[in-house]
Image (cartoon, rainbow, N blue to C red):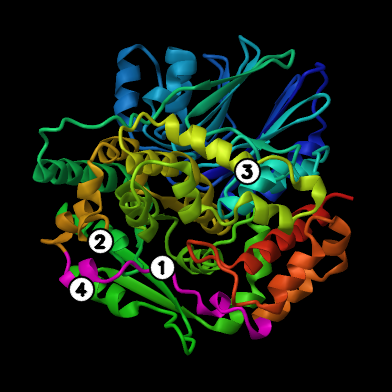
Amino acid sequence: MCGICGELRFDGARPDPRTITDMVARLERRGPDDEGTYTDGPVALGHRRLSIIDLSVRSSQPMVDKELGLVLVFNGTIYNYRELREQLRGKGYRFFSRGDSEVILKAWAEWGEDCPRHLHGMFAFAIRDLNKQTLFLARDRFGIKPLYYSVTRNGLRFASTSQALLAAGNVDTGIDPVALHHHLTLHAVVPAPRTLLRGLRKLPPAHSMTVTADGRMETTRYWRLDASRGTPANSEWEWIEATHEALVRAVERRRTIADVPVGILLSGGLDSSLLVALLAEAGQSELFTFSVGFENELEEKGEEFAYSDLVAELYGTQHRRFTIPNREVLARLPEAVDAMSEPMVGQDAVAFYLLGERVSQDVKVVQCGQGADEVFGGYFWYSQLQEAGDADIDRFAALYFDRDHEELAAAVTTEFHGQDYTRARVQHGLCSTGASDFLNQVLSWDVTTLVVDDPVKRVDNMTMAWGLEARVPFLDHELVELAIRIPPEIKLKSGGKHVLKMIARDLLPDIIIDRPKGYFPVPALKFIRGEVLEFIRSVLCSEQCRNRGLYRRSHVDQLLAEPDQHYTPILGSKLWHLALLEFWLQRNVDRITP
């Protein structure tokens, strides 16, 4: 796990060394163990390393293969690198390191632009082919690893974070109206390739891009989730058994691969508890588990230690739990926002940030349960969608969109009204999944689009801010390919995630399996009052916010007058949403660009 960056000049000039230096400096926290740069003619590459596999200098980056004429910068982990290594060795390739990075170079030499199809894992990488004079970029199937880029007048730059590209300069930081519509409608999700900033783009998941010396850029989709219905004859238990086998492969045979200890973020919910149980079932010993909690508020508990302690005791894990004072949450929110490549309105982002700080002192790698709800139908709105009748974009919008187009137009100034971009994008996305039933259309679109830019990005940004690699086994692409075909009526039994609950019956106490779906409790931010309300007011009433001219003042005043009355269908605070977006712009754009 690392941070990568680079530049390719289209005019043949050498990149300014300060550009790479500035970008690498902004990536330091993603890779605290080492750094490196490479320059050759119009290309410069930079890398910050978090040593996970092959800790020796042989796997340092940028990795240069002189024999093949290739240079690599890579962020992520390839879980099938050992199998690929043997396969490529059989084809005559010679290896000088023991890690997964070099396998990518050999895979490119053997399969060219098809090489990402052969990789199982999470990855974002760039390969400079000295013979073809091209730059090849690729991102994993679910976008677990980020890859941003900007096109300047003279070339292309790329990096693991938006902050690195902003630090390099020459980025158009004007607000993209289409992206803003998505952001304010899809609870802060902006589907790739757009971002909120006009001059900043991100490579879509499951895509690669080839860039030539003269500036031609060709983007290719190398994988698509097939959501067509499975064999009707499959019984419920056959689906459960097949899922169990796929989950064991994802959890134990793939995501424990490392030359350092691998821990588990244990919330005490079904998903993370099942990870612990499956690893123990497979014979893993020395399990390291970590839980975080906050002080209680009158209306809500801030921790669920009773459940995580129960699982840790049951399986004898080496367990650590952290209690964070509520006063620390708001005080350190600016740090968490500085680590967000794009604004994230989920209030548990700061929880992951503070948890990452503490866990990174003990381990470099953790597994976590992100993605399980989207893959197996765990959220309450999935059942609502299933019960509402025939497939219809209006039904989806009513249960999912934060705001309809009319309310959005009332929230932002005329410059950003435009069309109902989000409805059109979602309707096209649902119809393109290949699923024969509406709920599997929704789940397929969620897991390939929305999950990328909400929980997955949140976990990557907040953990990598502390040099902590987070692995998400529920987004193993072979597991998802199986799960998406399971009939919705099976997924939604038992109140959702029926398949996972049945797998857990022999592994976990019923109290863990049958308790209501929980969410990362951060009560210090959940209730819009006191210091939280004053923080929001200070952001939305600031001179910067007024001068930006993004929001209609009448709408802001209406929300501030009733701070605890305006919530989205999935129970997000609309007031918090506006404030967090503005605060991110102040911290990440205003402070960097003149």
Q: Residue furthest top?
A: 131
Q: Amino acid at mark 2?
A: Gly
Q: What residue is pinned by disc 1? A: 519
Q: Callout 1: 10 Å neighbours few (<14), some, many (20+)?
A: few
Which residue: 52% across, 48% down? Answer: 50
The residue at the point 59 percent across, 37 percent down is: 147
Q: Within 10 angstroms of label 4, few (less than 14), some, or many (20 or more) residues? A: few
Q: Quadrant of residue 576?
A: bottom right
- Distance from disc 2 to disc 3, alpha carbons, whole Å, reads 48 Å
Q: Earlier in the sequence, mark 2 or mark 4?
A: 2
Q: Amino acid at mark 4?
A: Ile
The answer to which of marks 2 and 1 sits earlier in the sequence is: 2
Q: Which residues are magenta?
A: 508-531
Name which of mark 4 and mark 3 comes first in the sequence: 3
Asked if residue 261 can be seen in this view, the reply is no
Q: Nearer the viewer, mark 2 or mark 4?
A: 2
x%, y% of residue 176?
74, 42
Looking at the image, residue 473 sits to the left or right of residue 185; the answer is: left
Kindly identify which residue carries mark 3.
35
CA gap between label 4 and label 1 equals: 16 Å
Q: Nearer the viewer, residue 170 or 313?
A: 170
Residue at horizontal 29 percent and vertical 28 percent from the top: 83
Q: Amino acid at mark 1?
A: Tyr
Dot 1 lies on which element? loop
- Name the residue beneath numbered marker 2: 495
